[in-house]
Structures are given as structure tokens and as C-alpha cells.
Image (spheres, rainbow, N blue to C red):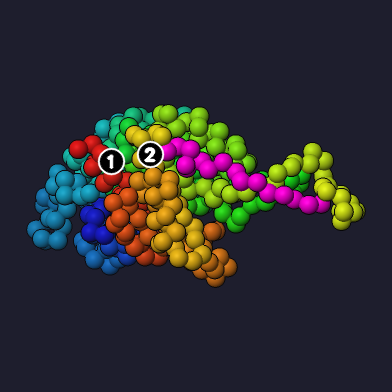
Amino acid sequence: MLRNKRIILGITGGIAAYKGAELCRLLVKSGCDVSVIMTESAQRFISPMTLEVLSGRPVGISLWATISDTSSAQRQIHHTEAGRHADCIVIAPATANFVGRLSHGLADDLLTSVVMASTTPVLICPAMNVEMFHNPLVQQNFARLSEISRYSVVPPGSGDLACGVIGEGRLAEAADILAALERVFLPKDLTNRNFLVTAGPTHEHFDPVRYLSNPSTGKMGYALATAAQERGATVQLVSGPVHLPTPPDVELVSVVSAEQMAEAVEQYIAKTDVLLMAAAVSDWRPEIYQAQKVKKETSNRDPSRHVMLTRTRDILLETKRHHNVVRVGFAAETEHILQHAKDKLVRKELDLIVANDVAAPQTSQTGFGTDTNAGWLVFSDGRTEELPLMTKKAFAHRILDAIVTIRKKEAV
Ligand SMILES: Cc1cc2nc3c(=O)[nH]c(=O)nc-3n(C[C@H](O)[C@H](O)[C@H](O)COP(=O)(O)O)c2cc1C
């Protein structure tokens, strides 16, 4: 996603300036075309030479060099030109001083001038002492910037700070900065769409402490909820029991059993545009629920030792009558994967089904519990598209890309 993106990396004068060098390396490694601009203070912490070598480009170090320097290298970073040709400006680390100058519209050095003289999105990654970060004036400055849509702040982390204290103010991890940068480039093609996503397993209890379930961890459903939200959708996530943090700006409904999940879906389906049933809903539940824990001393002949199963509600099938909802199912199969997926798509009248192989959960890189997935998209018109192994996040985006094409067709 970052390949060939033109990034201006602004490094300001904080102790974390050295981390700007690593970020520069990672941006270049991700395929970005990186131009670095350093404030005068930043050059006291790290040499422009380092950044020049890492970026493979001349480093902007002075507002005045762009005009008075006759060397063609310096002329390439012109304060009114540079930002216009960039896809994003990343300021990492951003000092309290820089945030203050930027939020008050000052343009008193090359970096602030480049930001001011462009409309490019700006990602601000602050790093500072904890008291400095919580200083009300500094917070006001962040708030001022956040009011303007082109500026977004990547919140600092907590931990050991260079000043010797523990607290908030550490530069965000490079992986988080790269993820935030990827979000800048995501299409907002799901804006004003309501998504209902189910995720995780269900637990079908036969007594208060024992249940029937499956190894689903919810990672695929949570990746879908996150990706849809990042592309502008309003997302309702109905989740079985999992150990995952709730994705930002996603509304979570926690359920335990298939029955509860069915009730939640029933409640929200009327205001849903797209239903993604990624949950691994149990097909069976114990017929009888014992209100008290069944004791292990219970005799073999005691009926409470015998668990009879009955079918749970078929949540996807029950939503069939909602014709204006784009309905997407998942088929986790162990054999005849495509055939079973196609049968399910027809039986449940789905718009799309995502098929994957869960035959070898312990060794495979796809299916339950893994961070990666591979599989097939099977469309209602019979088309299939194979998706190679990729992260569940990337897999989620491929599913959403497919959903966008279904929506467009329906709109015609
Ligand atoms: C050793 C040292 C470390 C500093 N670390 C930080 C820091 O982490 N964050 C910060 O906001 N300011 C820090 N400062 C203060 C800035 O360098 C100072 O505010 C400077 O004016 C910033 O200039 P700039 O924003 O133009 O880069 C530090 C100063 C010194 C001397």
C-alpha cells in the first residue's frame, strides 16, 4: 500500500530524533520515496548525513538554503514546492515546540513552511517528556490541530522516557506509525454504510462450567470490523468470547451462545447495509442445560452424563429475507472446500462467500487462530477468485474490495 508513495519525513529536535532514522529506513523498505527535512534542533541530535544515506536523497536543513544555495541538490527542497508533490508529511518525532508552532500557523523554518504551503495530509508523531505532553497548553495545541482534517496525531506510547521517568510521551512504535500512514491512503469508499460483523466462536454450555465450542479466535472478524471502520463504515461487531481488544470506533456487542448471537443479529439487521458473518457459530448445542455443575462422581447410568445435541439457529439463513442487505458468509471447510462453499452460497442465497481450508489448524497458516489467511471468494454469479496467503488485515481488505463491486452493481 505504501509502494511509490512520496513521503516527506520531518524530524524535529527531540531525543527520539534517532528513531527518525529507523523510520526512514522502514519507509524506504516499504517502497516509499522519502525526502527528509530536519529542523535546526534536530541536527543537534542526529546528522543529516545519516538521513541522506538512508533516504538516498538530499536532506532539507534550512529555509534559506533553498534560495541562496546554488547546489542543485538543495534546490530540490523548496518550501512551497515540496509539500505539493508529497502524498503525506510525517513528523516523527514531533517536539512540543514544533506542535506549538504548527498549531499557531507559524512558518519560521523549512519544515513548518513546507507544511503550511501545502494541503497534503500530515501525520504528527509526538515524543516528549510526560509533563510536557500533559501540559494543558501542549494539549490545547494538539486539539487545535485535530480540528483540521488534514492533521492526525499518532498518540505516543507509555514507558521509560529519556528523562528518566515512566509515563506517556514515548514516540509511537515504528509499526504503529506505518499502520497509521497506511490508513491515510485507504479509500473511504464505505462511508455512510452500516456494517454488521460477527466474529469469534460461540460457547454452547451444557452446565455452568462446560461447553461445546471450536478454536475460532475472532481474528478474521475483528480484522474485517477494523478494516471496514477504517474505510469509513459504521460498524457493529457482534462477538463471541474472544481475547482481542475492541477495534477503535467500533460498537461491540458481546455474546456467548449461538442463540444470543442470533438475537443480536436480528436486532441490528434492519439498519444494516452489509452483513459479514465471520463468526464460527456452533451448529449444535446441548439439548439440556444442567443448572448446576455435573459432578464427576455421577454414575454412568445417570442421564445427566449423556449430552444430546440439537441444532442451533441458522443465523445466515434467517437473514435471507433482507434482500437489500449484502450478505457475506464464510465457509471453513476441511474437504471439497469450493464445492461446499458454493452449495452454502446457493442454499443461503448469499452475495458472496469466503472459503478457506481449516483442515490442519496446528500447522497451517490459514484458518483458526492464525494471523494470516488464504482462500477463495465465491460470488453469486459463479465467479471465484483465489486469494493467496496474506495477513488477515490484507485479506479483510480484499473481501471489502469485493463487497464494493457488489454494491456498485446493485446501485446501477
Ligand atoms: C537533550 C534534549 C532533549 C530534548 N528532548 C525533547 C523531546 O524529547 N521532546 C521535545 O518536545 N523537546 C525536547 N527538547 C527540547 C527541544 O529541543 C526544543 O524545544 C527545541 O526548540 C525544539 O526545536 P524544534 O521543534 O524546532 O525541533 C530537548 C532538548 C534537549 C536539550
Sequence-wise, the earlier of marks 1 and 2 is 2
Q: Residues within 10 Å of mark 1 (few under 14, many from 20)?
A: some
Q: Nearer the viewer, residue 304 or 404?
A: 304
Q: What is the three-letter code of the residue carrying label 2?
A: Val
Q: Position of residue 76 (x, y in %)?
A: 14, 56
Q: Nearer the viewer, residue 192 or 268?
A: 268
Tag 1–tag 2 contact (CB < 8 Å): yes
* Mark 2 within 8 Å of ligand 1, using the beta carbon: no
Residue under circle 1?
407
Q: Judging from the image, what secondary structure is the residue with disc 2 in?
A: strand
Q: Judging from the image, what secondary structure is the residue with disc 1 in?
A: helix
Residue under circle 2?
274
Residue lying at 60% horizontally and 43% vertically, measured from the top left: 312
Answer whether residue 137 is visible to the viewer in this image.
Answer: no
Relative height, residue 59 to residue 88 (above, below): below
Residue lying at 42% horizontally and 55% vertically, measured from the top left: 343
Residues drawn in magenta: 305-320
